[in-house]
Image: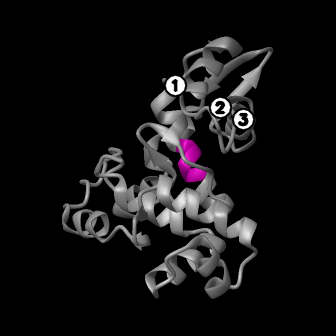
Amino acid sequence: MNSTPSDAPDLVRLLADATRARVFAAVTLGARTTTEAAEDAGVRPKDAVQAVRRLLDGGALVQDEAGLAVAYARFCDTARRPAAPAVDHGTGDAATEALLGTFVRDGRLVRLPARWDRKRQVLRHVAERSFDLDVAYPERAVNEPLAAWCDDDPPVDHVTLRRYLVDLGHLDRHDGVYRRRADDAPAALTG
């Protein structure tokens, strides 16, 4: 696996699963086979096999003639690499930038916040970046930019985004025509 600036989040996600974390810890402490790792981690052998496969595929573990081992070189390279610069979403507010940095990556929604005040801020950002003030948009012209915010495996789809934007007052809907409200301008962003 090639090292990229996204290695650290990938490794963290890889170890975010409890079974994989336990198997990884067992290998770190000396388990050299999947059977040893299952026993030391206290997990079912079938679960250990799956965990080892994912850890090997993800580059957290390596396997050679001596058995399983931690891919220390990858962890060291990842730790030495400078962090990717923070993305500026153009809000001018540090708290809003931090919030958007959590939920928006590469112009796509990673997920929506559970808290409604945060959800409102993230969706306001989506509305500001997708629609001009007081311009009439037919539903199809609303769906296309909203679909661009969604991944192939979305935390939310464009239809849900459209409904939230209307429900939270970022867009008005009348007779199948949508408009971004003038009172939804950035100055109204209070959190």
Q: Where is residue 105 shown, x and y percent of the image?
A: 44, 45
- Residue situated in front as seen by the camera: 90 or 42: 42
Q: Where is residue 175 shown, x and y percent of the image?
A: 80, 14
* Sooner in the amino-acid sequence: mark 2 or mark 1: 1
- Residue situated in front as seen by the camera: 86 or 14: 14
> Horizontally, is 25 left or right of 79 in the view?
right
Determine which residue is flagged by label 3: 166
Q: How are the colours assigned in the image?
A: one colour
Determine which residue is flagged by label 2: 171
Q: Secondary structure at mark 1?
A: loop
Q: Where is residue 111 shown, x and y percent of the image?
A: 60, 50
Q: Main secondary structure of the magenta part?
A: helix
* Sooner in the amino-acid sequence: mark 3 or mark 1: 1
- Residue situated in front as seen by the camera: 155 or 65: 65
Give the residue drawn at x 62%, y 23%: 179
Examine the rendering and report whether any part of residue 69 can be seen: yes
The mark tally for this picture is 3
In the rendered image, the vertical position of residue 179 relative to residue 108, given as above or below: above
